[in-house]
Image (spheres, rainbow, N blue to C red):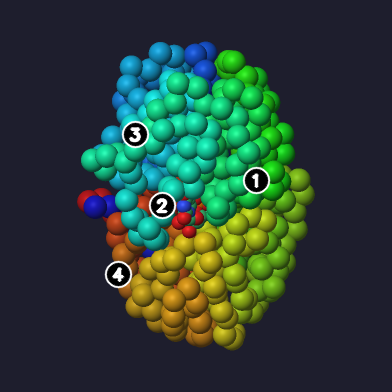
Amino acid sequence: MEKLLIKGGKSLSGKISCSGAKNAALPMIAATILCDDKVVLKNLPYLQDITTMFELLGSMGSEILLDENMDFTISSANLKDIEARYELVKTMRASILVLGPLLSKYGKARIALPGGCAIGSRPVNFHLDALKQMGASITLRNGYIEANASQLNGANIKFEGVTVTGTENLMMAATLAKGQTILTNVAKEPEIADLADMLNSMGAKISGAGTDKIVIDGVDKLKGTIFDIPADRIEAGTYLVAAAVTKGSITIDGINPNRLMKVIDKLRAAGAEIDYNEDSISINMKLEFPNPVDITTAPFPEFPTDMQAQFSVINAISSGTANIYETVFENRFMHILELNRMGCDISVKGNHAVIQGVKSIYGAQVMATDLRASASLILAGLCAEGETVVDRIYHIDRGYERIEEKLNYLGANIIRLPS
Ligand code: UD1
């Protein structure tokens, strides 16, 4: 297995561009199932999760072409198969995103039930309950979700809990349903509005995406489109933290700061100077030790759970004590044990971490457990004394495009060690 060797202590400076957002791209690739025309997706990030999604569509019969501009053309007309096999679903839970489109377009779908994952049990009951309300019959058999519906019907659906991929699945399913669907208690993440923009450009009739209530008027057919994937707010946030923990000064281009306001507020509270315009954010960290910042994760527009592990590192080297409450996933502190092996002083009780800042941390051999946990270990390696080796970095390759290249461009010293 490949590893990253990080020689810590370098202050980051310079400018990089943000890549396309993984969490916007995945539902958009699934949405191509909804029409028979070709769909062109631009600015797709080169990531393992994107490859897995293409593998899934390819296994069902989609044709995927990459041109000289690195744009992908996806043609999902007349799929020969409507099954998401366990081998693919187990490596990426977001495979569940093909359920809504398959059911809406083909009237059936067979999707392996995603199991637990490193950050919690992550069930899909909200997706299934909502699809049932649209008239789908759903049975669970041999570890698979078997869903059928000769025609999905519009419905008034209030989600029991806020779910990002659940909202996306239902929004996609409702585009071709008969009549109007009203979704409430939905997720408001920017990627939901991005997906609605793409679907509307395909002829869907969706309003309210990004608010508490989404209204979808079903149409008979969707057409092809050409769509640009917006920038990845979590990637941008991670690099901002990299600058904050290395007393750095960097600019990230291509990112809309409105998608990161809670993160920007917390970075300012930690002592960083931040400037932005409509598509770029600059950070300058002058404090020797960041101020401690309390964090409570919650659905957008609150502080994102996908930035929680990164802020553990800011607090770990801060000048005081901070509290982190993780309210979205029940088991998202796996990085803490590894951070403590690097000299951090963090205790965890349930969903609450108490972080006592220390004057310095030191390199160690550490193990990545999930995507954002691996990001936090790299961040810790950047500000640690000596060398850090991060193992199991396939987790990081799922969600960060060329991370060591981008960080080295900013002045870090990271080497990818071969298997
Ligand atoms: C998405 C993001 C992920 C992010 C998460 C929360 C993608 C591909 N992934 O994941 O990066 O960390 O949102 O912002 O966009 N839940 C249920 N039943 C369900 C669905 C969810 O109980 O049917 C629970 C989950 O266990 C979790 C919470 O709801 O505790 C939120 O999960 P959800 O928003 O669905 O996360 P994902 O969409 O899987």
- The amino acid on which the numbered mark 1 sits, given as a three-letter code, is Thr
Q: Which residue is drawn at 52% across and 41% down?
A: 130
| Image coords of residue 169 (percent x, y) | 51, 37
Q: Which of marks 1 and 4 is nearer the N terminus?
A: 1
Quarter assignment of residue 199: top right
Q: Residue at x 44, y 26 (%)?
A: 149
- The amino acid on which the numbered mark 4 sits, given as a three-letter code, is Gln
User: Would you call the spot at circle 4 few (<14 residues within 10 Å), some (14-19), or many (20 or more)?
Assistant: some
C-alpha distance separating marks 4 and 2: 32 Å
Residue with the mark numbered 3: 146
| Image coords of residue 202 (percent x, y) | 62, 21
Q: Which of marks 3 and 4 is nearer the N terminus?
A: 3
* Secondary element type, mark 4: strand
**2 and 3 marks in contact (CB < 8 Å):** no
Q: Is residue 325 above or below residue 82?
A: below
Mark 2 sits near ligand 1, with its Cβ under 8 Å away = yes
- The amino acid on which the numbered mark 2 sits, given as a three-letter code, is Pro
| Image coords of residue 328 (percent x, y) | 52, 62
The disc at residue 123 is 2
Which of discs 2 and 3 lies nearer the camera? The answer is 3
Q: How many marks?
A: 4
Q: Which residue is drawn at 50% across and 77% down?
A: 352
Q: Which of 152 and 222 is in front in this view?
A: 152
Quarter assignment of residue 367: bottom left
C-alpha distance separating marks 2 and 3: 16 Å
Mark 4 sits near ligand 1, with its Cβ under 8 Å away = no
Which of discs 1 and 4 lies nearer the camera? The answer is 1
Q: Which of 209 and 37 is in front in this view?
A: 209
Q: Residue at x 52, y 68 (%)?
A: 326
Residue with the mark numbered 4: 365
